[in-house]
Amino acid sequence: MSPIKGFSLVYAPLNAGRTFSQGDTIEGMVTFTLTKETKVKGLSVKLKGDANVHWSEGTGDKRKSYSAHRTYLDLKEYLVEKKENGTVLPKGDHQFKFGFTFPHGVMPSSFKGLHGKICYMLVAKVSRSWRLPSSVVKDLNFVSKSSHNVQAICPQSGSVDKKMSGFASGQLEMSATINTNLCSPGDTVSVAAQISNSSSKQTKAKFSLQQKIVYRANASIKVSDQSLLKTVGETIEPNSAETASCQFTVPADVIYTLQDCEIISVNHYLKVYLDISFAIDPEVEFPLVVVPCGFATLQPGGALGPYPAGSFGAPSYSDLLPPAYPIGPSAPAGSGAYGYSAPDPT
């Protein structure tokens, strides 16, 4: 029976959202109770950040699996120095404090999807000779600062025309304008489409908010392109010109735009298209950058138009977060052990 009881890890949150970003310091404590004097080979805490993707395709003998891995963070601190002969800890309660600072650099935000995830975590482990190590893991919510400049992500532009001709007995033309392509959960995005229907067919304007997740493993990709919201405009009669408009509220649980991970990306776009029977539907697409609340602000210069597809960053809001909660003072309480006000359990 293991003499190690109540092995736990707690850390102090920096804000109400319990998020961390580049440059932030995370502090906490590892605690446990020994029922007898015990020799340990080492006690350590790791701060890790990894991205993984995995999916399978085909059946039977033709079934093939794809996977990829990236390590973004791997920091380690020994709370009890690792020694070949071990260190004897006395019976009783033990508390060890630790601290890490997230390095500056490109690290993607936390993410969890059907075929991949980006995870940041604290891992505490105590090792003993000829015994399985005792460990505890705490997942962290990381919001990245590694992003492009907002002006580069969202260049100002006018509306762009998209035309379709050669079907039925006439011609159809459409142009559309969006009020902003930088938004946050709960924001309202407005789009207007000017439609000239010179054909002999009725048509309807349709609007769709799309989310596209791409998983990459070497030269292979797995794409998940789903519609988050859809709406249908009024009927446009033959030989008429109308303006169709709609407003979308960005869902509260939407995944933020993610473009700083080599094996996982998340993009959003607003699609405006015309539903025409027995014909190719003309469409206009507007890339959207979805960022945490408090970061997105409408830039001056009027309405923004659709833009060519490209890489979009995932700006973070950590600069706008509330100040850190204080951690109580600490004082040495013996060899390697520290006593201080414990942070809120997590």
Image (spheres, rainbow, N blue to C red):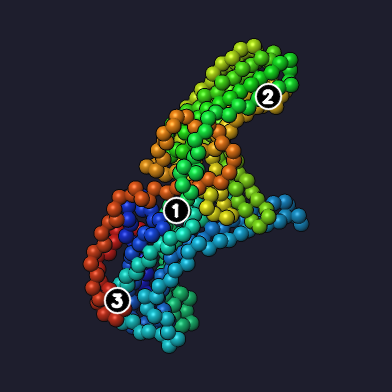
Q: Nearer the viewer, residue 260 or 74?
A: 260
Q: Is residue 148 above or below residue 326?
A: above
Q: Which amino acid, mark 1?
A: Ser
Which quadrant is the N terminus positioned in? bottom left
Label 3 secondary element? loop
Which quadrant is the C terminus positioned in? bottom left
Q: Which amino acid, mark 2?
A: Met
**Residue at 56% over, 36% down:** 307
Sequence order check, earlier mark of 3 and 2: 2
Residue tagged by mark 1? 144
Residue tagged by mark 2? 164
Tell which tag, 1 or 3, sits nearer the viewer: 1
Q: Nearer the viewer, residue 15 or 127?
A: 15
**Residue at 55% over, 43% down:** 267
Residue tagged by mark 3? 337
Q: Nearer the viewer, residue 91 or 172?
A: 172
